[in-house]
């Protein structure tokens, strides 16, 4: 059908249904459908002549959407999430490699032991050059299946003082898929739970935890002393203290017991938090450890689990940060360094349905639930007052908490965040993805829910980096950010949180977008008693900067500033400007 044929309702409906089934079979075609949606103004099909939403997505469309969703679900089952292959090996360094010998997925152990990162090649692993070549050669043989689908590579690692084995196995996928190789090493991964248990149960100090970790890694007293920058005598005294506290007899007993702790049941009891007390990684870059440290988790009063990220000094001045639908949770080294310099502690609750946070019940309002969860978390952390930093479309989360708990929030900063205009009107920009989800959330919520699921499937299908490039294709500033390798690794890891199969981020994403279309005017007015400053990016395709005068007229107490040379990832692009503002706001809250 051409654009000129769009006046034929039946043909238009057939076209929409054809594209919906096409998305179910090939999620990456969602991008083309969104382009078509705008070029042919297909949103007209869902409003009547008065402009009110119709029931066009009633029974006939819903039945087709349900069938298409079943197809999409079957495709997801047939194409497993690569992270699922790593789940059995959480105590070992393991990763998955594709046909190009680039890492498609890796666990924390591989990140820590070999500096593995999604998208990096085997030739970039922190291993001796000879071993990297041998690993690449053996992996290619396994992927081609010329000799065997499973091989073992043995190497002596002088730097680690031990022998390491690599088992390389071809992963069974569908015939039309490119093969992948699962690489599992014998390198033990020191998990945060081990450190937590040693500290809580046996009162081991951070230094003693560090010594235990080195012993488990196979190092001897001399190499431990060198790594820790201390004397062998000090290390021997620490080992003696450890055996005394743990009622053990030897170093071998320490290693055996620590490895047994790695299998100790994990999880939360009652309302307690899963405590992270990992020993400081003195033999590694501390900033890198801060960037990639595991999230914390907390059991909420209704039994759900809430994950959150805690960045910067634990004793620093706190601020709350939202993560947007793209899960921009982690910060790169440069931003973490700024946080430590400015004594800023940044707490980012991972909303229900994203990451490892439990799903939201369909009967719960996503914005109200987020406020309740955030208040519970802050009470648990014994934080009474702090500024709220909202990113992207997350402004409703900030103003809802202000309205419900004015005692908690001292001021609001928005980075790409903006209010609705009176009456619930949205000042949407030229970004087609944003406009598509706004129009479907408002007029065709069932289509918005299906499209949200397709977004997550598309991200898994084409990979998180390609997904980022798709979302940022109209913003040169955002695309330029992906040319920075350090920044790209963090952004890729962030967006991967929304597409993992262990959560229902698609449902959460759709529920939030539908909620965002409500009239939030009264809640915006509830912020008149505190400072509110919003920074809008020049290249953000989701916002119409021409609406700023209308915003200022409706909400004269809110400050607006346009930031040049920035786009969707405003916080990351202008960190040197914005992080000091967060730190100043956090200091004022004391």
Image (tube, grey):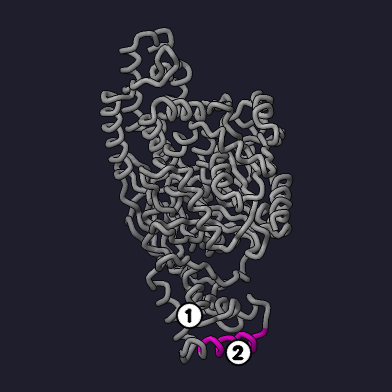
Residue under the image location 30 percent in, 45 percent down: 77
Q: Is residue 427 shown left or right of residue 268?
A: right
- Between discs 2 and 1, the one toward the N terminus: 1
- Quarter holding the N terminus? top left
Q: Is residue 111 found inside the magenta-colored segment of the image?
A: no
- The numbered disc on residue 166 is none
- Asked whether the viewer can see residue 527, the reply is yes
**Quadrant hosting residue 537:** top right
- Asked whether the viewer can see residue 323, the reply is no
User: How far is disc 2 from disc 1 in space, using C-alphas?
Assistant: 20 Å
What range is drawn magenta here? 231-243
- Depth order, front residue of 383/224: 383
Determine whether 20 is above or below 559 in the image: above
Determine whether 232 is above or below 360 in the image: below
Where residue 150 appears, as percent x and y from the top left, is: 34, 59
| Label 1 secondary element | helix
- Depth order, front residue of 513/214: 513
Where residue 507 appears, as percent x and y from the top left, is: 39, 41
| Label 2 secondary element | helix
Q: Tell me the residue that label 2 is attached to.
A: 237
Residue under the image location 55 percent in, 81 percent down: 204
Determine whether 193 is above or below 333 in the image: below
Where residue 573 appears, as percent x and y from the top left, is: 67, 42
Q: Tell me the residue that label 1 is attached to.
A: 201
């Amino acid at each position: 059908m051409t654009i000129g044929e769009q006046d034929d309702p039946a043909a238009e409906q057939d076209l929409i249904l054809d594209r919906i089934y096409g998305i179910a079979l090939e999620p990456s075609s969602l991008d083309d459908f969104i382009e078509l949606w705008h070029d042919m103004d297909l949103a007209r099909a869902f409003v009547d002549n008065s402009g009110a939403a119709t029931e066009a997505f009633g029974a006939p469309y819903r039945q087709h959407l349900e069938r298409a969703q079943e197809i999409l679900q079957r495709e997801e089952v047939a194409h497993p999430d690569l992270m699922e292959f790593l789940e059995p090996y959480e105590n070992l360094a393991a990763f998955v490699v594709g046909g190009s010998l680039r890492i498609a997925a890796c666990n924390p152990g591989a990140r820590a032991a070999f500096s593995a990162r999604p998208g990096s090649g085997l030739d970039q692993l922190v291993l001796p050059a000879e071993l990297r070549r041998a690993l690449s050669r053996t992996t290619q043989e396994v992927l081609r299946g010329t000799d065997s689908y499973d091989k073992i590579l043995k190497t002596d690692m002088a730097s680690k003082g031990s022998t390491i084995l690599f088992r390389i196995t071809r992963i069974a996928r569908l015939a039309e898929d490119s093969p992948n190789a699962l690489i599992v090493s014998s390198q033990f991964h020191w998990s945060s739970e081990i450190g937590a248990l040693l500290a809580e149960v046996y009162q081991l100090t951070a230094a003693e935890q560090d010594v235990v970790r080195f012993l488990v890694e196979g190092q001897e007293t001399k190499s431990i002393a060198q790594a820790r920058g201390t004397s062998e005598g000090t290390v021997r005294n620490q080992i003696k203290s450890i055996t005394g506290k743990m009622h053990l007899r030897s170093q071998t007993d320490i290693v055996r017991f620590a490895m047994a702790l790695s299998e100790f049941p994990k999880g939360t009891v009652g309302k307690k938090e899963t405590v992270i007390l990992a020993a400081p990684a003195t033999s590694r870059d501390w900033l890198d450890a801060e960037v990639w440290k595991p999230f914390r988790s907390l059991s909420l009063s209704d039994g759900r689990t809430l994950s959150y990220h805690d960045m910067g000094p634990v004793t620093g001045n706190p601020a709350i940060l939202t993560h947007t639908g793209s899960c921009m949770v982690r910060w790169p080294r440069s931003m973490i360094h700024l946080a430590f310099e400015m004594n800023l502690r940044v707490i980012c609750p991972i909303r229900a349905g994203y990451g490892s946070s439990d799903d939201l019940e369909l009967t719960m309002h996503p914005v109200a639930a987020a406020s309740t969860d955030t208040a519970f978390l802050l009470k648990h952390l014994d934080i009474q007052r702090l500024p709220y930093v909202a990113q992207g479309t997350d402004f409703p989360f900030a103003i809802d908490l202000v309205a419900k708990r004015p005692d908690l929030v001292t001021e609001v900063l928005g980075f790409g965040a903006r209010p609705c205009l009176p009456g619930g009107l949205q000042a949407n920009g030229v970004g087609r993805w944003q406009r598509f989800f706004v129009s479907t959330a408002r007029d065709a919520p069932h289509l918005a829910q299906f499209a949200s699921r397709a977004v997550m499937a598309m991200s898994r299908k084409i990979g998180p980096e390609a997904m980022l490039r798709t979302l940022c294709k109209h913003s040169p500033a955002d695309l330029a950010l992906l040319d920075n390798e350090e920044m790209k690794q963090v952004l890729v890891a962030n967006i991967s949180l929304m597409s993992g199969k262990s959560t229902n981020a698609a449902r959460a994403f759709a529920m939030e977008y539908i909620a965002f279309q409500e009239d939030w005017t009264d809640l915006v007015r509830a912020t008149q008693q505190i400072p509110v400053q919003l920074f809008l990016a020049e290249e953000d395709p989701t916002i119409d900067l021409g609406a700023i005068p209308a915003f200022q007229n409706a909400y004269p107490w809110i400050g607006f500033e346009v930031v040049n040379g920035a786009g969707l990832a405003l916080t990351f692009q202008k960190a040197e400007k914005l992080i000091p503002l967060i730190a100043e706001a956090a200091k004022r809250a004391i």
